[in-house]
Image: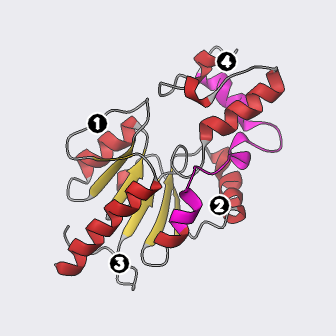
């Protein structure tokens, strides 16, 4: 695993993505879209990355994001948590440093921080960073195919986990996890190796 990245009693630094990992972005935007446009989309309809506008009446992703920004409250403020995410993060935070790393728009920063506070996420650090590999962590968890690729390439000495979704694919050297229980198991294994080293 290499040298630990923290001097604190926290054993590992866990670099955790927000959308599709902690917050259910697809369920959130689809609920708002269905309500506003009398549509009947379902989160299972999302099977591609950066293709959300194709499911809607918007012609481009720029138009989709302009709608998602809203006037007073962006779609990011009202996302439901992913199943098991809040409980797992609270448990992980008792032994490890939870580091939220998200590539959110500037206009979504305040809604993101409010969401984390409202849901009691014990994150010691929150980074708004498109190049997530620049934030050093022992383990990363993401669902973006581009982030997974970059993390695996730039941080090969660390454990990179892919939250399995229809919009990403297996990659050599990346650990697949389907839910938070599986991720907690990976963290436990890496922690045991760190303690034995």
Query: Up-down: is 15 above or below 95?
Result: above
Tell me if residue 46 comes above or below residue 119 in the rendering. above
Residue closer to the observer: 64 or 43: 43
Q: Position of residue 64 (x, y in %)?
A: 66, 25
Left or right position of 143 against 30 = left
Residue 36, how many percent across, how many down?
82, 26
Q: Quadrant of residue 29?
A: top right
> Which residue matches tag 3?
11
Q: Earlier in the sequence, mark 2 or mark 3?
A: 3
Distance CA(mark 4)–CA(mark 1): 28 Å
Residue depicted at x 71% and y 52%:
111
Quadrant of the snapshot with the C terminus: bottom left
Q: Secondary structure at mark 1?
A: loop
Q: Tell me if mark 2 has few (under 14), some (14-19) or many (20+) residues whose alpha carbon lies within 10 angstroms of its own.
A: some
Mark 1 vs mark 3, CA separation in Å: 28 Å
For the question of whether residue 186 can be seen, the reply is yes
Question: Foreground mark, 1 or 2?
Answer: 1
The magenta stretch is 61-89
Task: Say what secondary structure mark 2 lies in.
Answer: helix
Look at the image and say whether residue 76 sits in the magenta stretch. yes
């Amino acid at each position: 695993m290499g040298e630990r990245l923290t001097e604190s009693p926290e054993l590992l630094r866990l670099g955790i993505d927000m959308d599709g990992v902690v917050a259910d972005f697809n369920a959130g935007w689809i609920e708002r879209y269905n309500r506003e446009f009398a549509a009947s989309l379902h989160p299972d309809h999302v099977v591609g990355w950066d293709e959300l506008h194709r499911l809607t009446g918007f012609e481009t992703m720029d138009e989709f994001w302009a709608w998602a920004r809203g006037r007073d409250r962006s779609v990011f403020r009202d996302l439901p948590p992913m199943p098991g995410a809040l409980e797992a993060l609270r448990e992980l935070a008792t032994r490890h440093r939870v580091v939220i790393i998200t590539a959110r728009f500037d206009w979504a920063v305040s809604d993101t921080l409010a969401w984390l506070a409202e849901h009691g996420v014990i994150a010691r650090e929150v980074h708004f960073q498109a190049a997530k590999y620049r934030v050093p962590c022992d383990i990363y968890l993401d669902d973006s195919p581009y982030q997974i690729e970059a993390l695996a390439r730039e941080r090969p000495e660390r454990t990179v986990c892919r939250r399995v979704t229809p919009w990403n694919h297996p990659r050599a050297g990346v650990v697949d996890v389907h839910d938070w229980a599986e991720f907690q198991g990976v963290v436990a294994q890496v922690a045991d190796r760190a303690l034995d080293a």
